[in-house]
């Protein structure tokens, strides 16, 4: 079972996004009690904070998608989203998130200032590393730039962390799969979601792509 929770900047965007998931084979539900076997999509209004808290309380696993600009609600779908998308990304993401025969590992970089993702199997705080933000020539770059990658990975503790996380993910993957969980989110957070977390998520994704029979995503939630 895969549950997609969709929030949006306005009602029309939410309906359009839900429509894209329906076209990809998801079944629309209007409340959490409507879940069963299969793939489902649930729209939330006004940030959906209460629905998200209820899903967390009931240990319901979901992927949170926010379509468009911020909803302006604290603890809502924009702050907590696993994926922030625009209209042109709806169809591809909907196809990608269908129930899977092959496991998917999402290596996610996020900013703590915008809230931590709710459904991460592993959540790693990267703020113990020296921050490239305070290096003038690196401040306006991101963790996708080679100079920032070098700065972060030249810190020995970064490599040691990735060694440990890689081993843990390899050990956890068959255990999650045996329970029917085919999507594993490994989230790295730093202050702004621009430098340290991006480097670590990207480097882990490269390592995990060596595992046969597994799909790997690299997502930078809080930067383009």
Image (spheres, rainbow, N blue to C red):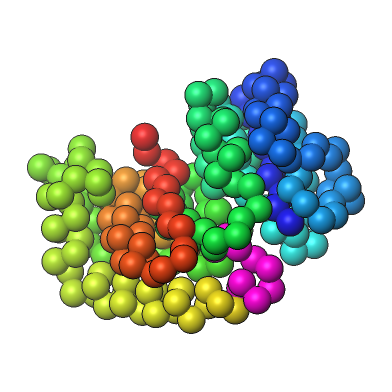
Q: How many marks?
A: 0
198 versus 45 height, above or below: below
Determine which quarter of the picture holds residue 121.
Answer: bottom right
Q: Nearer the viewer, residue 104 or 84?
A: 104
- Residue 78's x, y, as percent? 57, 37
Region of the chain picked out in magenta, as a range: 176-185
**Residue shown at 59%/46% (left/top)?**
97
Check the image and name the residue furthest to the top. 12
Residue 74: x %, y % from top left: 62, 40
Q: Quadrant of residue 41?
A: top right
**Horizontal and vertical percent position of residue 107:** 43, 57
Q: Inspect this view and state whether residue 196 appears.
A: no
Picture coordinates of residue 92, whole percent (x, y): 53, 35
In this rendering, position of residue 192 left or right of residue 3: left
76 left or right of 207 in image:
right
Picture layout, residue 84 above or below residue 200: above
């Amino acid at each position: 079972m895969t549950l997609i929770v969709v929030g949006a900047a306005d009602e029309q965007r939410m309906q359009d996004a839900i429509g894209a998931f329906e076209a990809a084979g998801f079944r629309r539900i209007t409340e959490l009690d409507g879940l069963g076997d299969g793939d489902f999509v649930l729209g939330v209004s006004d940030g959906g904070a209460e629905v998200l808290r209820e899903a967390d309380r009931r240990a319901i696993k979901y992927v949170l998608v926010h379509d468009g600009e911020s909803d302006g609600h604290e603890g809502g779908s924009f702050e907590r989203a696993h994926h922030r998308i625009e209209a042109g990304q709806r169809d591809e993401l909907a196809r990608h998130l269908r129930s899977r025969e092959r496991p998917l590992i999402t290596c996610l970089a996020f900013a703590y200032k915008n809230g931590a993702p709710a459904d991460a199997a592993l959540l790693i705080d990267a703020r113990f590393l020296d921050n490239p933000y305070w290096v003038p020539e690196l401040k306006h770059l991101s963790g996708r730039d080679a100079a920032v990658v070098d700065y972060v990975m030249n810190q020995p503790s970064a490599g040691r962390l990735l060694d440990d996380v890689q081993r843990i993910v390899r050990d956890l993957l068959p255990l999650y799969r045996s329970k029917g969980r085919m999507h594993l989110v490994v989230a790295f957070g730093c202050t702004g979601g621009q430098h340290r977390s991006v480097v670590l998520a990207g480097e882990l994704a490269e390592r995990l792509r060596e595992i046969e029979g597994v799909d790997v995503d690299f997502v930078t939630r809080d930067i383009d």
